[in-house]
Image: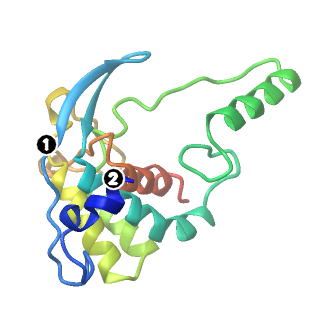
Amino acid sequence: MFFRQHGRSILPSDHGVAAYRSYRPQGYVSFHIHEPKRRLISAAPFRDRIVHHALCNVTQPVIERSLVFDTYANRAGKGTHRALDRAQGFARRFAYFLACDVRQFFSSIDHEIFRAQLRGMFSDQGVRWLADRILESGIGVQGLGYSMVYFPGDDLLAATRPRGLPIDTEGIAQLAREARQQP
């Protein structure tokens, strides 16, 4: 309802966000949650969230084809309840399981590597441009609590490359999670 009434004042123009390269993300509001551990959340303004969802709508069909079956986050027809049902089914069949969390996942995303993965997934220059703008908007947002982790293939200059992605950036965060699943 709100968007129908105020949409024109929120989005940059009628001509398309990426077509004229006019979109610039606004600043994030950052706060900590403690569920189950302390996490820094960086919330994007409503206008930017609309753009993030638009990016998801365009990229989702491409990404969906490459996902493993048991990926449940941000997928139509999946979600928390389906993931729990699936986990309970596995628990009935197997005596052991591995519970894990990738430490500092969003903080450790290397922008250079992520951009290369996006170029391999999307040929559309508008999608690439918009993803770049959103990615750039998060430089330094997660950096305060990040301890540099070196990955195979990193050199000493890896620490100087931009890293990190605000957790609340749905469109780009979805791409990042799924790009990590690529072989």
Where does residue 39 sit, x and y in percent of width and height? 31, 24
Number of residues whose C-alpha sits closer than 10 Å to that of mark 1, classed few (under 14), some (14–19) or many (20 or more) = some
Residue identifier under label 2: 2
Q: Secondary structure at mark 1?
A: loop
Q: Is residue 43 visible?
A: yes
Disc 2 + disc 1, Cβ < 8 Å: no
Horizontal placement of 36 versus 109: left or right?
Answer: right
Q: Residue at x 44, y 52 (%)?
A: 174
Q: Is residue 149 left or right of residue 182?
A: left
Residue 89 to residue 82: above or below: above
Pointer 1: what residue?
A: 140
Which one is nearer the viewer's eye here, 12 or 62? 12
Residue mark closest to the camera, 2 vs 1: 2
Query: Residue type at mark 1?
Result: Gly
Q: Nearer the viewer, residue 94 or 71?
A: 71
- The image shows residue 130 at horizontal and vertical percentages of 27, 69
Q: Residues within 10 Å of mark 2 (few under 14, many from 20)?
A: few
Task: Tell me the amino acid under the disc marked 2.
Answer: Phe
Residue 158 is situated, as x and y percent measured from the top left of the image, at 19, 49
Where is 172 relative to 94, above or below?
below
Q: Quadrant of residue 89?
A: top right
At numbered mark 2, what does the secondary structure look like: helix, strand or loop?
A: helix
Q: Position of residue 47 (x, y in %)?
A: 24, 56
Kindly report the distance in space between the C-alpha atoms of the residues bearing marks 2 and 1: 31 Å
Q: Quadrant of the C terminus?
A: bottom right
On residue 65, which mark appears?
none
